[in-house]
Image (cartoon, grey):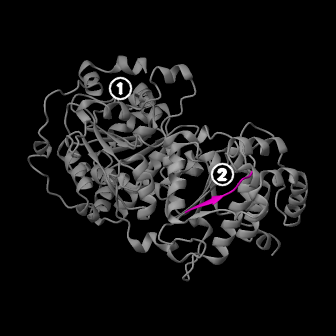
Amino acid sequence: MCLALQLLENRTRRYIFPLPNTEKVDWEETVPEKVPIFSLFNESIATNAEQLQAVQQIFAGPNPQAPYIVFGPPGTGKTTTIVEAILQVCLQEYTRILITAGSNSACDTIALKICEVIASSERLQELVKYSNEKKTLPTWRLIRFYSLLYDRKKIDPNLKKYFKCIAAERNDFKSLYNYKIIVATLCGVARMRYYANFCPFTHIFIDEAAASSEAEALMGIAGVKDKDCHVILSGDHKQLGAVIKCDRAKSLGLGQSLMERLLLNKLYEVDTSGNYDRTLQSRLRQNYRSHPEIVGIFNKLYYNCELIPMAPPSQVNQAAKWSVLPNRKFPILFQVTHGITEREAQSNSSLNKLEAQVLCWYVKSLLEDGLGGDIKVQQEEIGVVTPYLGQCRLLKLMLRQRGHHKVEVGSVESYQGREKLIIIVSLVSSFKHPYFLSNPRRINVFLSRAKSLMILIGNPISLGQNKDFEFIIGQCKLQGNFLTKKKTAKSKSKKTAKSKSKKTVKSQSNELCKTNLPTVQLQEEEIDDQQDNQDEAGEVVLLDLQNQLNELNICEASTG
């Protein structure tokens, strides 16, 4: 980062570290005086005021005082907006564009979206074809740089249709002058600058900017940006950011992204009426991904109720006839489990066998019975999310054993920027404080992945120690989608539960073995602690195992 700062000229340094504007901003004058008139490649953008404003502002030329930011919460069409802006800028003469991000997957996502738009436009196809034939012209020639260590077999064939894809060696950097659009990771850009003198760029687009540390982002700017180059940052600083393992680095602020730091500057301030300087930022609000009730949860928790659900009902109402949902107007289900959190043998990661078994039952039920109303569910439409790698490995094994090879299992980090029709979350933490899950950005990610149905599996007593989970659980209870056991006469007396705990554990374990479920060992001291510290939670833990299996019909599903 120090080297990057040294490479920044005074003018560029002030651009990255703008002085707060203490003068009153006239919001009405922040719209471009001459709104550019052009034909959109994606005509749906014309119906979204924030997306259209972003494209027009980037096309007309953002404020030279500081980087332009496109704040794109989940499902608001951030990538669609950025790709439209890139292609519109490319239509201008003498423009050269650098597209970069912290990871290869993020770079490929935006490059593939460009290919998708080009494939749907005869005009763009002609421009690309002509430019490739006239190799001396940089107009509409596209290149995707990979590192030498990158596995070329992973390159998407669709990307090769319009991009030249190469693993860059030192001599390859000399050909950069011949390309209109260059796509590379932030580290790749640093290598380019080291080996070659750049022909000036007019625009630098840093996608998923909130997921990269400021030091990483500066690698895409330092020594690359000149005085006439615009920098456009896009992302969502309320989702997962860069991983900083050094506590000292965190304490010095290196865990904060460039995008987040800029948004705290008074220049980017949003007033009480929701107005802001539109020459410096665009804040996307319309969510096209999820059911309105799913949007409502993370909207209230993290976005001050600013998001507007706009997804077509036909795409997000598939669970409206699912018989398992008590309230079918609220497609969020919290399934109570009281399994034990264990440590994985070969690592320090956590797992929860009972949650894994319950999750497998839900997957099997969805695949066999569908969502009702003749709506079938394919394995590819189900996403399984869990915060612990140990639980990931356990779930992958159990699902493979049941023939569900195409059900994708991943960590919260791996699902950032992704979406699935159905998301099932195994929260793992049980009878312990959910420290790892207390990060609101991590919670925000898994809450915002589902399109039509979200199933949360966990221990509400343990999770409820976190205020965000307390709100989520409260909403599920309020809407009637909080599935738990029914208390029996035995569960009404602590003394009765304690005196019969050993017998219950033994019979419970035998019953679980009969149904081919993993045996969950419960210890008396853990149960007693829960009884003393968490009211009546501990007294029904033993009974809860069998009651849950009965209510979910797991016994029949496993033996059938």
**Image position of 14 with respect to 456: above or below:** above
- The amino acid type, in three-letter code, at marker 1 is Ala
- x and y, in percent, of residue 460 in the image: 62, 51
- Residue 29 among those drawn in magenta: no
- Label 1 near label 2: C-beta < 8 Å? no
Residue 547 picture location, percent across and down? 75, 64
- Residue extent of the magenta highlight: 333-339
State the residue in front, 468 or 410.
468
Q: Residue at x 54, y 82 (%)?
A: 373
Out of 48 and 148, give the one closest to the viewer. 48
Neighbours of disc 2 within 10 Å: few (<14), some (14-19), many (20+): many
In this view, 278 is above or below 480 = above
At x 74% / y 49%, what residue is drawn?
Answer: 538
- Of residues 513 and 496, the one nearer the viewer is 496
Disc 2 to disc 1, how far (Cα)? 48 Å
* 413 sits to left or right of 400: left
Where is 348 relative to 154, above or below?
above
Pinpoint residue 429: horizontal percent, then vertical percent: 67, 45
Number of marks: 2
Q: Secondary structure at mark 2?
A: loop
Judging by the rendered image, the residue that carries numbered circle 1 is: 222
- Which quadrant of the figure contains the C terminus? bottom right
According to the image, label 2 marks what residue?
459
Closer to the chain start, of discs 2 and 1, is 1
SS assignment at label 1: loop
| Residue type pointed to by label 2 | Asn
